[in-house]
Each structure stands twice: as structure tokens, then as C-alpha cells.
Amino acid sequence: MSSVMATLQSAVSHKAAHQAATLSNISRRTIVSVATDRRAELGTTRSMDYFPHLFPIHCKPRTSGAEKRSLKGSSPVRREFHSAHRSLYRQPNPANQHAIASATQQTSKDVRPRGSQIISEGNLIKPETIQPGVNKTFNRFDMAGTATIVTGGSQGLGLAMAEGLAEAGSKVYCIDRGDQPSQHFKVASERLLPYDGGQLHYRQADITDTKALDNAIADIAAEHQRLDGVIAAAGIMKVSPALEYDVEDARKMLDVNSTSAARQMMKYKTQGSICLVASMSGLIANKGLISPVYNASKAAVIQLARSLSMEWGRGGGEEGVDGIRVNCLSPGHIVTPMVRKNLEEIPGVRETWESENMMGRISEPEEFKGAGLFLLSKASSFMTGNNLVIDGGHTAW
């Protein structure tokens, strides 16, 4: 009986070892296959450029059968060309070395898996962290080393766009009037991963208090000796007939303070970008929602962006300042905490709004992450004085 048990244990152990080896081989083949498929996209040449820790140091790229056949009867000139071409394979792309070193240091216990990651033995490697050449498209969206501000960034649309900037590598400061950040802000901060490179910080200030906002922005700019971008997402909405508005309510809605941000950009000679969050309500009147002053305030924001882009586009006349870009983002209806309150209080409004756009639904704040990143990054470097409308086709009808 003991010999039988020993045999069974040996068989089980052998089977487990075989399964582990098979899984390891599958994992390696999967990684190499994915890396090969992404070779052209990310600007590298061989799989070992992506995952040097998976290859022995003596590994050399081998000439494929097709290359051998083409060389066999080729002319000396063609053979010389192939030789020069293959020599490019022998050195990994220098632009990737720092990113590869950083990525391979991450262990599975340090990070949480994401759908965009390639999973290898004991490591989670994010392809986006491997930097291609300086001319590659995604470098235009890189916000590493930048300092940015989002007003109204404690929750809703402002927080979603702030998170997008942080995921692209920026140090983002969310300014809002609450003494403490919201629970949504805390959750978003915890969602950031170490290799994202960015950070979310909270600063308390009332944006309707010009002096307090000026001081908050000046402190942030002084800390980093730069200010690269601002998203003015703080907003107030009041549903009320025009004749029932008082002057103070109207003034609060029309207040948009972007001059303090521009002043700091000029002070530190930063080629910055400002995004003023307007609304499609600045272009149309919303069915089922009586809010004339709100609509007028958003139309004013759109025109303000055009005027400021003209004034600050060449540095506002300041010597040595490259210029500041100013654009608007005009979302359609979004389910933010502010809008959700209106949906609950006014029967039938949600159904009306959903039926008025081509996609038959209301958007979520997270759907505007990319737009905020685009407007503040170098990806939009030749865009200023414009209004980016993202409304599910609402205003196209």
C-alpha cells in the first residue's frame, strides 16, 4: 500500500510540474505573440525589446526563413541592405529603456490588474508605459511632469476629467468649496496606480471668492514653478423663470475666473492651456427645463473663450511667453450630482432628454475624460478659440 501511495504522489507531483511548465510556455508564447502584434504600433523591433527579463542574455534575433530565401539569390546590394536592416534589431529602442526598467520592477502585489495590461510571470506590464519614439501619437497625450488645476473637481464632471489627467501623469489639484474632499474624490485617488505617475490633490477655495481663488492658484504654481493647464468645471445651475432670478443668482452663474490662471502661466512662462466647461445649453434652449440665465451664462463662456484665446494666444504681449490656448468643452446632458437632483424633482425630464439625442441616453462623467485630456495636452496644440461639443448628437438634430 505504501508503494502505491508513493507512486500516486509521484504521479500527481509530476502532473503538477508538467501543468506548470505548460502554463509557463503558454504564458511566454502569449506574451511574445502580443508583443509581436504591437511591434509596429509601439515602435520596437523584437519581442526582447518589450520583455528582456524573459530572454537569456545570449539570445540573438534569428533570420526568418523568408529572409534566408530572399538572401540566397539576392544581389550584393540587396544582401547589404538586409544586413543593415537586421542590425537595427540588435539594439532595443533607447527611448524604451527607462519605461521597460520601471515596468519590470512592478510586481503583482504592487498593482491591480487592468484590462489593458499584458500579464507575465509575476509581473503586470502596461503597454502604454513603454514609450515609443518622440514622434509617436500617444506621446502627445503624455502629461508627465505637468501641474494642472481643475475647479469644481471634487465630484462629477470635474473629478472625472481630473482623474483622466492624473492617469496621463499630471499632478492635478482639484479646487472646490467643501472643507474636505468628497467620498467620490477619495475613491478616485485610491484608484490611481503607481505607474500612472500622476497624483490627485485637494485644495479648498470658493471659486466665487476671487481673492481666495487667486491665492490658491498662485500657491500651486509657486510650489511647482509652473502651471500647465486649468479646467474650469465649477458650475451652478438654478431652474427658475427669468423674471424670478435675482441679481446675485445671475452674477454667480456668470462668474468664470480664468484670469488668475493665465496670470500664473505668464509669470512662469508656461505654454499652458485653459478649458472652460460650457454646455450645449449655450447653443440651444433645453426642452422641459426653464433656465434662461444658466443658458445665457454658458453662451457667455463660449464667447469668453474666443475672446481670451485672441488676447492670450501670443502671450498677451508678454516677452518670452509662448502663448496660452483657451477652448471650451460643451457637454450634452450628463448624470452628475447637480443634474440628478433636477431629474428627481422634475417628472418626465429624463425621458425627454434621452429622446432628444441620437444615442437615446444621457452621458456619464467618465465619458469626458478623453476630451479634457485632449484639450489640456499637446494633442490639441493648434486648437484655440474653439468649442468642442460632445452631446450624443443632440444639437445635430
Image (tube, rainbow, N blue to C red):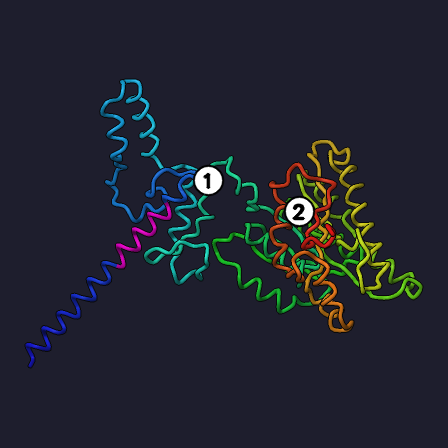
**Residue 32 is covered by the magenta coloring:** yes
Disc 2 to disc 1, how far (Cα)? 24 Å
Q: Which residue sits at x=24%, y=62%? A: 20
**Residue type for callout 1:** Pro
Q: Residue furthest right?
A: 243
Above-or-below relation of 82 to 268:
above
Image quarter where the N terminus lies is: bottom left
Q: Earlier in the sequence, mark 2 or mark 1?
A: 1
Q: Is residue 206 left or right of residue 247?
A: left
Q: Position of residue 265 (x, y in %)?
A: 70, 42
Above-or-below relation of 357 to 81:
below
Closer to the observer: label 2 or label 1? 1
Q: Which residue sits at x=89%, y=65%? A: 241
Q: Which residue sits at x=59%, y=54%? A: 164
Magenta-drawn segment? 23-35
Q: Is residue 194 left or right of residue 92?
A: right
Q: Position of residue 317 (x, y in %)?
A: 77, 33
- Quickly name the residue at label 1: 132
**Residue type for callout 2:** Gly
Which of 314/357 is in front? 357
Which of 151/6 is in front? 6
- Quickly name the residue at label 2: 229
Q: Residues within 10 Å of mark 2 (few under 14, many from 20)?
A: many
